[in-house]
Image: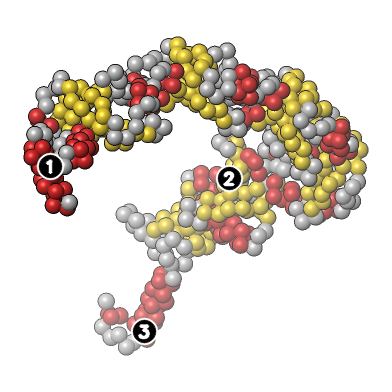
Amino acid sequence: MEIYKDLKTPASKEFEKLLNSQLSKTKNLVEGKIIEGKITKITEKFAFLFIEGLKSEPMLDINELKSMGLYDKAKVGEKISVLLERIEDRNGEVLVSASKAQKIKGWDKLVEAYEKNESINGKITSKCKGGVIVEHIDTGSLMFCPGSQISDKPLKDISHLMNEPLKFALIKLDKIRGNACVSRRQIITSNKKGDKAKIVEKYKVGDVIKNATVKGYSSFGCFFDVNSELDVLVHLQEISYSRVNHPEEVFNIGEKHDLLVISVDKEKLQVGCSIKQLSPDPFEHISNYELNKKYKVKVVKLMDFGAFCELEPGLSTLLHSSELSWTKKNPSAKKMFKVGDEIECVITEIDKEKRRVAISRRLTDENPYQALEKKYPVGTEIESIVNSLNEYAIYVKLSDLDIDGFLHCNDLSYSGNPEEELAKYKKGDKLKVKILEIKIDQQKVRVGLKQTQKDPLSWFENKKVNDAITVKVISSDQKGLVVSPEGCEMNFTIKKSQIAINAADARPGRFVGGERIDAAIAEIDINKRKISLSIKLLEELQNKEAVSKFGSEASGKNLPFSSLSDKLKKNTEEK
């Protein structure tokens, strides 16, 4: 302890210098960093390392070196990279890992290659769901390659690629999770791109490619192989002038066909071809067909909105659902026809610019509404059967024609309540109705039931305004009287204000029902079905007549009208 008595001695200064240098080396060691260690000793289980700045020698498990393939290279004096996990654990030992250091170094290399857009060397070690596992040859890092990125062509067997050195492109890195995704297909495609550009340059629009082989097809077209050097697409619309639902209807894999080049895209390195343009356009024969004439057509495709038919192979026409039937509501071509049926139709439209031909099935038959108008003109009575009902009308099937007539509830009865009258009928009832209106262009027919019966208002045909009639009181309420003219089957209302001239007498309560009284016709319009009756008007008319006949006040008092004397007095004064 004498060395510490005097800190100014050369020995104490030298010790202080050595101690500071050792501490500075220890400060440079940070947990989580990769450092170099020198192998000092190898036993059956461990390899001991010397790392400057550490107070003890860390140990590496021999099995770890074997799994990394470094056991044969591990010799005394050799340096090895390790990850410093703990400078001192619970037992006072230093913890290091060579495998973790290798993975971290490998990830750094992957990140560098990804940022520089460089390819890496790897080998497929195993299969997994959706793809394969690829091992980075330089670092041993594991990466994922999707099945679609293994090759530019579908491969049923990849056994010849297993554990073989291959080049891969890094297409995705997840730095947070430490996941890498690679692609072999991208390497193959990039290598072929230069060659493909030279191949595409050989073709120009208008060239005919002989004996191209059907390679595959999809819902939008068919793929052909040209001389085993180029794949071209024939779009669905370029296969045939006839309507084609799917290429497999026309082609078989391995068949050979001639193709016409119709497009060349040098940027996308794509060549588009056509088969139908090698043959004459059937639409050029459209001049052989005339409008409004009947022709046999073949159903080739059924749709929800109608059917596509052919006048001749390749010359397609549209039969819209609205042209299927005169009378059926929402007719369905799928229910009426099947593919391959030959039916007779009339050409209704030919549009050469739009290359469109429209046909009609219903025009092959006479318009039933025109036949109805000829056989049963407006005003004719016809037998019918109730077909359906709704809340305000009845639809009736007219006689032997497949036509429905519209019968509104207001046309059921002259006198009854429309809603109550409608409730009296049900589907299947037979009715004799009158044709009221036929609209051929709108395909509508209106009929009436009450028009077949005698109109109660005909009782007023010989009557005129101010005529006096006898009525029977049916009932009374605060609004007035309900009366029925003698000999007429209809009821009418006399308003309270029209019961009497004197307001005191204009009380509906004076009547209990059953009384026979006289009233005058105040208004009559049979066409508008409007009739108004008034007791007050009759009083006024009779007063006027009495005044004109009897000029003295005394004679007027014998009349049973309370207001007559006043009128006579006024008339006398005027004389």
| Percent of width and height locating residue 476 | 15, 28
Which residue is the site of mark 3? 13
Residue drawn 22% across and 24% down?
A: 471
Residue drawn 39% across and 31% down?
A: 526
The residues bearing labels 1 and 3 have C-alpha atoms spaced at a distance of 164 Å
The first of marks 1 and 3 along the sequence is 3
Position of 8 relative to 447 (above/below): below
Q: Residue 403's quadrant in the figure?
A: top right
Q: Secondary structure at mark 3?
A: helix
Give the position of the N terminus as an image quadrant: bottom left
The residues bearing labels 3 and 2 have C-alpha atoms spaced at a distance of 60 Å
Q: Residue 462's quadrant in the figure?
A: top left
Label 1: few (<14), some or many (≥20) within 10 Å? Answer: some
Residue drawn 51% across and 44% down?
A: 63
The foreground one among 464 and 325 is 464
The first of marks 2 and 1 along the sequence is 2
Which residue is the site of mark 1? 552
Residue 144, disc: 2
